């Protein structure tokens, strides 16, 4: 990306940049321009170790020097496409916690939310006593199969 392409329209966009041989992804949360530089603040998708520190965000800086495109290592990524599933369980979601996750050490999770959130790019949001919304970028087939096999479902709708 060229220094001249950095502007406020990029806020909220998903991006990737190379830093010290690592490919780091995140969301642009702020853009700042000075007389000598253009800067984009990135909220990292995963915390990054920088020496003894663990950072959740950082700045990518491009200096306005003739012919210098210091932001050439910054790329915008296509927005992920999430699948959505609305699940109404036959019983209370808290009951599932007691029935299925009675031994958290065996499952590696103590709740249904913790189990589903353990799938990469997948989130479980309870919206009622028996209803939840599950979103996933690419693991929905596995999550759906697991739910159908291990829980009593009243309705299952894709949105």
Image: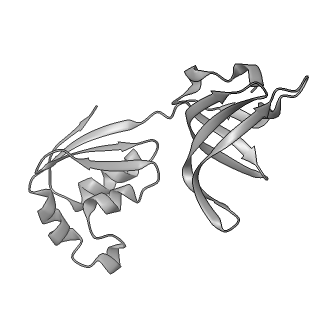
Residue 137 screen position, x and y as percent: 45, 41
Q: Where in the figure is residue 21, as x and y percent of width and height?
A: 79, 52
Which percent across, then down, holds residue 18? 74, 45
Question: On the rendered structure, is 132 left or right of 134?
Answer: left
Residue located farthest toward the right when viewing the structure as drawn:
67
Q: As rendered, which of 108 and 145 lies closer to the eye?
A: 108
Q: Quadrant of residue 69?
A: top right
Q: Name the spot of residue 60 as percent of width and height, x first.
A: 70, 39
Q: Is residue 33 visible?
A: yes
Up-down: is 96 above or below 16?
below
Q: Nearer the viewer, residue 68 or 37?
A: 37
Please report the residue visible at 66 percent of the width from the left and 68 percent of the height from the top: 52
110 to the left or right of 137: left
Q: Is residue 12 above or below residue 148?
A: above
Residue found at x 28% / y 40%: 85
State left or right for residue 10 relative to residue 64: left
Residue, far front = 35
């Amino acid at each position: 990306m060229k220094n001249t392409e950095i502007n406020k329209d990029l806020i909220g966009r998903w991006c990737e940049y190379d830093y010290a041989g690592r490919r780091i992804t995140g969301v642009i949360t702020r853009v700042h321009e000075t007389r000598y530089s253009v800067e984009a603040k990135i909220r990292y998708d995963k915390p990054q170790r920088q020496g003894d520190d663990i950072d959740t965000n950082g700045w990518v800086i491009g200096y306005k020097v003739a012919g210098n495109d210091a932001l050439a290592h910054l790329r915008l990524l296509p927005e992920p496409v999430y699948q959505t599933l609305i699940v109404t369980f036959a019983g209370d979601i808290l009951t599932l916690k007691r029935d299925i996750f009675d031994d958290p050490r065996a499952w590696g999770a103590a709740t249904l939310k913790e189990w589903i959130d353990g799938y990469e790019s997948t989130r479980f949001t309870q919206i009622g006593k028996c209803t939840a919304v599950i979103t996933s970028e690419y693991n929905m087939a596995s999550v759906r199969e697991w739910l159908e096999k291990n829980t009593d479902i009243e309705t299952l709708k894709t949105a």
